[in-house]
Amino acid sequence: MLTCDFLARRYSKLPSEILESGTTMDLEIAEVAVGYEQYVSKQQKSGTPVINHNYSQDELKAMVDSVKGR
């Protein structure tokens, strides 16, 4: 229900229109677009690039070290 409401609000459609003609591609595009809008907003507020990859610095270092060791 919330997903249908999210798409309906995003595209200014009635929920019944979304149910009738919407696809999973519409949902994926809307989710990526909202994520990007949030990223840009955070970047503008902070004045610096916002990077959120959900890895700790130690995990990233371990990944780099494992590639260098090949």
Image: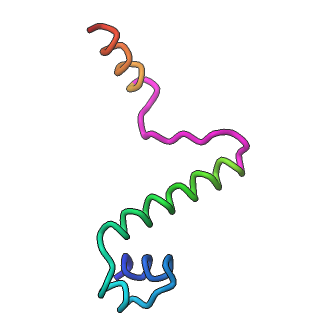
62 above or below 41?
Answer: above
Q: Which of the 4 image quarters holds residue 51?
A: top right
Foreground residue among 51 and 10: 10
Magenta-drawn stretch, dominant element (helix, strand or loop): loop
Which of the image's four quarters has the C terminus?
Answer: top left
- Left or right: 53 with respect to 39? left
Q: Pinpoint residue 68: horizontal percent, then vertical percent.
A: 34, 10
Please, which residue is most extreme toward the front here?
A: 21
- Left or right: 50 with respect to 65? right
Q: Pinpoint residue 16: horizontal percent, then vertical percent.
A: 35, 92
Report the residue at 37% width, 69% height from top: 27
Report the residue at 57% width, 59% height from top: 37
Foreground residue among 53 and 59: 53
- The residue segment tinted magenta is 45-58
Q: Which of the 4 image quarters holds residue 38?
A: bottom right
Foreground residue among 65 and 15: 15
**54 inside magenta stretch:** yes
**48 inside magenta stretch:** yes
- Left or right: 10 with respect to 68? right
15 above or below 67?
Answer: below
53 above or below 6?
Answer: above
Q: Pinpoint residue 28: horizontal percent, then vertical percent.
A: 36, 63
